[in-house]
Amino acid sequence: IRVCGLDFPNPFVIGSGPPSTNARIICKAFDAGWGGVVAKTTALTDTEVVNVQPRYGKLKKGSETIGFQNIELISDRPFEDWVADFKTVKDTHPDRILIGSVMESFEKGRWQEVSARSAEAGCDALELNFSCPHGHPETGMGAAMGQDPDEVEEGTSWVVEAVDSPVWAKMTPNITDITLPAAAAMRGGAAGVSAINTILGVIGINMKNLKPMPTVEGHSTPGGYSYLAVKPIALRMVAELAQSNRDMAISAIGGVTNSTDAFEHILVGGSTVQVCTGAMLQGFEMVSELSEGVLALLEQHGFDDLQ
């Protein structure tokens, strides 16, 4: 499938997060058959990042996990290490699509530096993280920036000015109308958007100590909610984005656990489909079912191809 001038072996992409946290893991995803990988979000090295433990929680119905929450921040590795990783991945998997994910404070120089250096190191495209619900909001990063269409437009234009590769802006669902920042990103020169990032939530209260989960040394915070339980919201927002602009490429994200979920995202407007939590819980091997299942559904319903 060709999207924004890039040839993906298949439309299934590992979303930015724990399944893409270094070169070794990204290469493992490509070896399993994923068409693309969005690397773990990076920032310039002087950004302080401290990831806590525990930072994950599951919402279960009986023995089945239906929801997943994280309070994980962006990569805590030096940006220079990521530059080396990008080069390694492209050297070993030149036919796969490597997408860099970047997030910075509202400063032109910082956005342009981290984006240009990622592209120079081998990233085929960039995804701008305007959407992490708990990513340094005190410094105006992540969703704090993504909830302001003016900042989304300007930030996107900075990156588009600095690189020649396609740029996707990753949208936050924690907003009344997701089409407004998406339109701003397109005005800024984006080729498309990725949607949705996680939904800000509290997964529950621990009945033993009456503290919200996950609890870190007696403290907690709302985090990003994902997996199957968010699929209805994700499908609605992807559909709204597709209806708002037919020329906008959409990398659809949210609640994908199998090929039916992925096909639903394609039907409402996704050109590629990202999976993050699903790969964490099921393993990279789930891409085989995604590929075989979507091909079977295309044939069943009389489609010649995904285009």
Image (cartoon, rainbow, N blue to C red):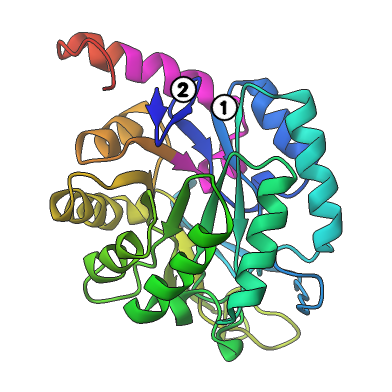
- Would you name the residue on which mark 2 appears? 10
Badge 2 amino acid: Asn
Disc number for residue 34: 1
Q: Residues within 10 Å of mark 2 (few under 14, many from 20)?
A: many
Report helix, strand or loop for mark 2. Answer: loop
- Asked which quadrant contains residue 86, the reply is top right
Q: Foreground residue, 64 or 27?
A: 27
Q: CA distance from mark 1 to mark 2?
A: 7 Å
Residue lying at 15% horizontally and 14% vertically, measured from the top left: 301
Q: Does residue 28 show up magenta in the picture?
A: no
Magenta span of residues: 274-295
Residue 42 in view, yes or no: no
Percent of width and height locating residue 161: 51, 61
Q: Residues within 10 Å of mark 1 (few under 14, many from 20)?
A: many
Disc number for residue 119: none
Q: Foreground residue, 96 or 283?
A: 96
Percent of width and height locating residue 41: 64, 59
Badge 1 amino acid: Trp
Q: Is residue 151 left or right of residue 129?
A: left
Q: Is residue 44 left or right of residue 198?
A: right
Residue lying at 60% horizontally and 55% vertically, measured from the top left: 101
Percent of width and height locating residue 115: 63, 59
Residue 134 in view, yes or no: yes
Percent of width and height locating residue 291: 44, 19
- Marks 1/2 in contact by CB < 8 Å: the verdict is yes
